[in-house]
Amino acid sequence: MRTSHTEIRKKISDAKNKYTDEQVFATPGFQGYLNDLAESVSKRYKRPLKVKTVWDPSPGSQIAWTDNNAILINTGNEISLSFPTRAMKADSIIGFLGHELGHILFTNFVMMNACNSTFRQGRFYPSIPQNLSPDDQAALDEILVRLDEKDDAVIFTVMEAVHHIFNITEDAYIESRMCDAFEGKIKTGVRLNQVRQVELIPSLTKQIDSGLDGYAIMQNLFLSYVRSGEINNIGGYTGAYLNTLNACVPILDGCRYDEDATSRFEASNLILLKIWKYVEPRIEENRERMKQEKKALEDLIKELEKNGPQGNSAPVKSGRFFAPDPNAEREEQGEIQKVVDYETGRIALIKTEGFDDGDTGGVVQNNFYTGAGYESSGDDIERLLSTMAEQEVYHALEQQLSEELQDEAGRINYGNAHKGIQVIVNRMVDVPDQLAKDYARVSPPLLLLSKRLQKQVAQILKDRRGGGKLGGLFMGRRVEARAFAHQDGRLFYNKRLPQEQGDMAVALLCDESGSMSSCDRITTARAASIVMHDFCRSLGIPVLILGHTVNEEVELFSYADFDSMDGKDAYRLMDMSARGCNRDGAALRYTAERLLKRPEKNKILILISDGQPYDGSYCGTAAEADLRGIRKEYANKGITLFAAAIGDDKPNIERIYQSGFLDITDLNKLPLNLTSLLTRYIK
């Protein structure tokens, strides 16, 4: 398979242009990108964490979630996908990541747990509000009476309201902390989401006309004011909702930038009292819903007891008697009229001086905000797209190569000794990350050995490929005038033309029979392969590295190939393992045929083996005769074959390969010996 670099770049460009949002954002690559961002933020605070992503574009789907240790991001959320460009969508997703990071870094989860625990006992946290107005005191007295009833619906409703109010102010706090601490991607994404989320809240008049209940309307007003310092009152509404909001504005402004979370818990309690008339009707709504959920659960239990579990049924949620776990902070976006029934991004923009009284409720807006100044978001996504496109193109090319290798194996005549034998060529198209990690861990000393050996021949290869002048000769047609001073008779020189094509190609075939597991033989063969691969690739020498075994069929394992495209052959070498039996003849023929097609003048084939071939009837003197015939046949065709014997069966291997026999007594020297062999041929 021959594919030019120009053709590859075109394929990559075409792949980039056809990607959908899901193909970009619902990938391990983008998840890794978010993990890198999260790590760059959290390492400052020594808070290791993981980011997971899901893709769920359905209406009302969850946006983001954290349990104070890990973060889940729905990269297909409605808000992010509502932006017109892919770069803005990516910024939005990063903004939600920044929001969740803000909770992990700055939210006091211990106090949140204490708040929930205290309210479950029917008490206020951190304490009962004091010094209240007559209206607020009346609301407090009524709430305390209702809490004393120990009614689950009452407790849940009060907790729900306090939880929502606290999160609105807490989000304003953590967002401001994140924007102050992290300029660039995080701040840009947070601000972008803030603008869009405020836009999604309908006007006050529209909310009222749609029949939205008072509790939901007040939550929307709080969200809008805390995020942007304004509300959408385009219809010119005047009335109770604005009066209540105006009464709450000083409380909101007084707590949302306070580093002490206690102030936000106290503010939530005060605001609860001021909106109690809107909260109380929800008690009966929640009571009815809890009854229905409880009945549904009981019916399901009865059904299961009657029929037993069936299939892979999804779990059914039980009635929610208490507020959501504060350690699992969530952001959700559903239908616009239900926006306050769950948490959303609650992103704050500007802290205003106050809220103007007037017939329209007043608007304070910053029209001079010009953005965070981060100009590389588009480049970030372009880089990600390029990486994804390259992976896709190289994956396709490797798949094509794998198929071509198998086709080629089917066209080879393996001779009578292997008549009816099936040959399977295995090539790993997708290389696991673990192999790359293993390679990085074990390769440094082996690569150092390779680099030392390369220095011995690098200049020789450079001169051959670049041409030049060979001086100091006793005879020739060209005389070098400066040589007369030496008076040694070396007066002549020759010009050498550049060699466009290298003069050596190498194939390494490794025995992967079960006996190779003994005495670290397979480990040594793997190490030799790593050195050989780096040596050849660094010097521009075409190299093929294969393993072979027999499991009913002859199996070949293509680790490094002449036509490999994805640059991951070094990692594939880590998969080399001791497996089954060995039918050397078939494997040698396949390898030799691959090598024979190379245009290089010198073709070197090296076999690493620890013993005679054995596969059922293919053994003993008949197998030896087959191997001697193969060696002679391909020697006549220009292939030099060496057999490196690394086991106790060296006499038999020497008898088979004769002058091509290499006695490797010290396994630790195998990588050095094989690479030195190539060095001698180059020189």
Image (tube, rainbow, N blue to C red):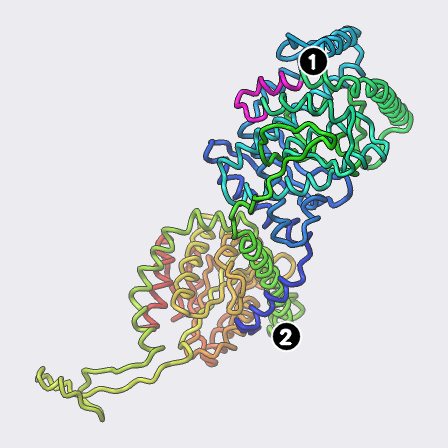
Rendered residue at 54%/41% (across/down): 187
How packed mark 1 is, by other alpha carbons closer than 10 Å (few <14, some 14-19, many 20 or more), is: many
Q: Which residue is mark 1?
A: 119
SS label for mark 2: helix
Residue 570 in the figure: left or right of residue 145:
left
Q: Quadrant of residue 675?
A: bottom left
Rendered residue at 52%/44% (across/down): 36
Q: Which residues are magenta?
A: 255-268
N-term mark: 1 or 2:
1
Q: Amino acid at mark 1?
A: Phe
- Residue 73, position in %: x, y? 65, 40
Q: Nearer the viewer, residue 584 or 230?
A: 230
Q: Quadrant of the N terminus?
A: bottom right
Residue 570 in the figure: left or right of residue 114:
left
Q: Quadrant of residue 196?
A: top right
Q: How many marks?
A: 2
Q: Which residue is mark 2?
A: 411
